[in-house]
Amino acid sequence: MSRDENKAVLVSRHLKKHGHISQGTATLEYGYFRLSDAILRLRNEDSDLIPDGHRIKTVMKRDASGHPYGEYQLVRKAA
């Protein structure tokens, strides 16, 4: 398992447990500075790590200073 694959596994576990993750959380909890790379991998190459019937949705939010950031959420696919 490569380092990038390992990152995708940890991000997948976090999404399954918490339902969402942001770059700030990934940096503080895992030391990852390129969360978007792991998300891209989960959406494409490692989609088997996402539970059946679910997808990763990006929701744009703003921090306390008004700066935008993306939060990745594990959501059910529309039927």
Image (tube, rainbow, N blue to C red):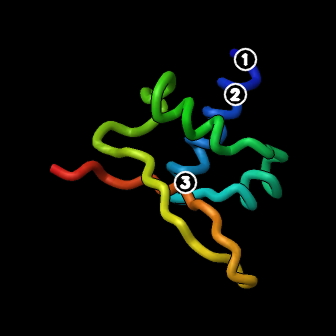
Mark sitting on residue 2: 1
Is 42 placed left or right of 78 in the picture? right
Few, some or many residues within 10 Å of mark 3 (<14, 14–19, 20+): few
Instruction: Tell me the SS state at disc 3.
Output: helix
* Depicted 26 relative to depicted 53: above or below: below
Is 32 placed left or right of 18 in the picture? right
Residue lying furthest front in this view? Answer: 67
Instruction: Tell me the SS state at disc 1.
Output: loop
Question: Is disc 2 in contact with disc 1, using a CB cutoff of under 8 Å?
Answer: yes
Residue pointed to by mark 3? 17
Few, some or many residues within 10 Å of mark 1 (<14, 14–19, 20+): few
Q: Residue at x 62, y 33 (%)?
A: 8
Look at label 3 and name its amino acid. Answer: Lys
Mark sitting on residue 6: 2
Look at label 1 and name its amino acid. Answer: Ser
Quadrant occupied by the N terminus: top right
Q: Quadrant of residue 25?
A: bottom right
Q: Residue at x 68, y 44 (%)?
A: 35
Q: Residue at x 84, y 46 (%)?
A: 31
Look at label 2 and name its amino acid. Answer: Asn
Q: Quadrant of residue 71?
A: bottom right
Q: Earlier in the sequence, mark 1 or mark 3?
A: 1
